[in-house]
Image: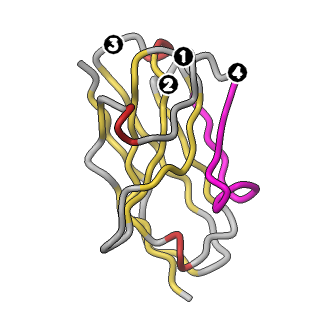
Amino acid sequence: QVQLVESGGGLVQAGGSLRLSCAASGDTFSSYTMGWFRQAPGKEREFVAVISGRVTSTRYADSVKGRFTISRDNAKNTVYLQMNSLKPEDTAVYYCASRYGNSYLYTGKDNYAYWGQGTQVTVSS
């Protein structure tokens, strides 16, 4: 079992930055691929970014490429999402997710077994 707790959301103006954190507990953190997803009101939960367990590979949604950076600190059992140049369309609840294994950078939400409770990010225009 893995428990995930997100933090760092809030209200920011367009063009601003936020850093989300996700603290994990319950198993060997480096054995898990970690992803970030987001869900805006009335929309499906969508992929944002993913990082492999040993920090060798990352993948991003086209909508955030060049603005967001996913990283992890395996010594602290934490994954981060640095969000720069934020836009109003980035407004959503952001979720951290994990899946056991590091063989592939899955972008589908159904591939992830463990989820955090979510943190709200609101970008004002």
The picture quadrant where one finds residue 125 is bottom right
Residue tagged by mark 2?
Answer: 33
Q: What residue type is labelled 2?
A: Thr
Measured in 3D between alpha carbons, the distance from the residue under mark 3 to the one under mark 4, in whole angstroms, is: 20 Å
Query: Does dot 1 land on a helix, a strand or a loop?
Result: loop
Residue placed under numbered mark 4 in the picture: 56
Say which mark, if any, is on residue 102. 1
Q: Which of marks 3 and 1 is nearer the N terminus?
A: 3
Range of magenta residues: 56-72
Mark 3 — residue? 27
Disc 1 + disc 2, Cβ < 8 Å: yes
Residue 28 screen position, x and y as percent: 40, 10
Foreground tag (4 vs 1): 1
Q: Is residue 86 above or below residue 59?
A: below
For this view, does 76 lie left or right of residue 1? right
Q: Which of marks 1 and 2 is nearer the N terminus?
A: 2
